[in-house]
Every structure is written in structure tokens, then in C-alpha cells.
Amino acid sequence: MSATGLFHTRYIVSAPVLGAPVLTLDLLVNTPQKKVSGHASIFQSVSPPLQFQANVWGHYSQAKLDPSAEHHIVLSLDGSPSSPNSQIAETFHLQGILDQNWKDGHASYRFFYQNAWHTVAHAIVTEAPAVHPEPRSGSKPYPHPIPLYAAALQQSRSSDNLAQMKSLAIQAEEQLKQHDNIEAALKQLHAEIARLEGRH
């Protein structure tokens, strides 16, 4: 993991309990300023399903918890549906400890959902695997469009990481729900392109 500059990282935060909420953090880390910002989404397969979203921001520090041990990253995040400068009340708070390479650790967090605060303590933080496109052989075109999340779904299925599988399944379902909206927007875009091309 990069130790300087800006870097992007994704985490799955979940307690080892069946049916527990699964938090996905998508973060940009600014190491010169020791600041972190990004997006948090929480899903829990209850009826009706819990779906929580927030923009998050915060900071981190490095701490040596034991003189003989390596440094740890102490992460503190807050969040809301808006930004840190807005007047909207914060709906998300997280305190976590990660290893010095930003790979894994533990965190406790709480979030405001349906007029109540919910707390998850001592959840396990694991780095979500990077999604790499599979190499193409030759210049043969693809027989059909490949959704952006297909490689991630295949990789997750082979990893045996239940929390990651659930998180990716949620993201895929959300993208599929947007199909009609995307199709309608694409038709409008084509109409606008045709209109502008008609001018020239």
C-alpha cells in the first residue's frame, strides 16, 4: 500500500455473525494531510432490507500500541448524506484500528437509520480485493457487453469471503435496478447527439 501521496482503498467491515450488517467503505487517503474521505454503504439482509448510504470524512494517526509492535493506523470517520460543511446532522461515526499497511483491522461504528442509532462493535475490517480486467486474447470483439461488476462478482465467488459476496451482490442489484433509467437517459443522449449533428 502506498505510504505517501493519495491512494484509494476499499474495505468490507462486518461482524462474524450471521445476518449482521455489512459496511463497505470506499476511501481516498490523503497521507500528507492525514485526511480520509469517501463513501460508506451498509446493507443488512433483514426484512425489509437495511440500506444505508453516507458520504464520509475524517482523519487518521499512527500509533504504537506496544513498544515491540509495529505502528498501527487509528482511523476516525464521520459522515452524513451531504458534506462536512453542510448543516445536515451527522448520521455515521466510525473508530477503527488498521495494520500499518492499511490491509485489515477492527472497527466499531454507529449509524442513524429509521429514527434510531444502531451500533456495531468490534467488526472485522478486511481490504476488498482490487478488481482487474481479465486480459483479452487477440483483437476479437466481445460477443456481448460485459457489466462493470462482472469480474468482481467472479473474483468474489472464488474467494469464499461471505461478507464481500453479499456486498458485491447488493451493488450488482443496485446497478440492475438502474437499467431502465440508464436506458432512458441513453435514448435522450442519442436524440441530443442527432439534434446537434443535424445542425452541422
Image: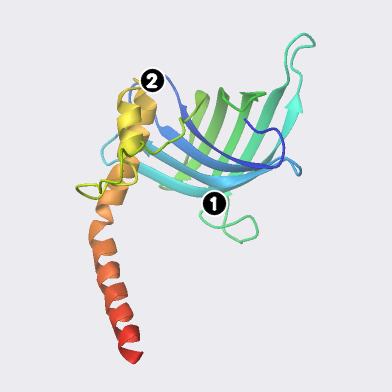
Residue 110 vertical placement versus 97 (above, below): below
Q: Determine which residue is flagged by label 2.
A: 17
Residue 130 rendering spot, x and y as whole percentages: 46, 34
Q: Secondary structure at mark 1?
A: strand
Residue 192 rendering spot, x and y as whole percentages: 32, 80
> Which amino acid type is shown beneath numbered disc 1?
Ser
Dividing the picture into quadrants, the one containing residue 58 is top right
Q: Is residue 35 left or right of residue 107?
A: right
Residue 199 vertical placement versus 41 (above, below): below
Residue 129 vertical placement versus 140 (above, below): above
Query: Can residue 44 be seen at all in this image of the molecule?
Result: no
In the image, 187 versus 17, the foreground residue is 187
Q: Determine which residue is flagged by label 1.
A: 80
Q: Secondary structure at mark 2?
A: loop
Q: Residues within 10 Å of mark 2 (few under 14, many from 20)?
A: few
What residue is shown at x 36% (from left), y 22% (from top)? 159
> Which amino acid type is shown beneath numbered disc 2?
Val
Residue 42 rendering spot, x and y as whole percentages: 42, 39
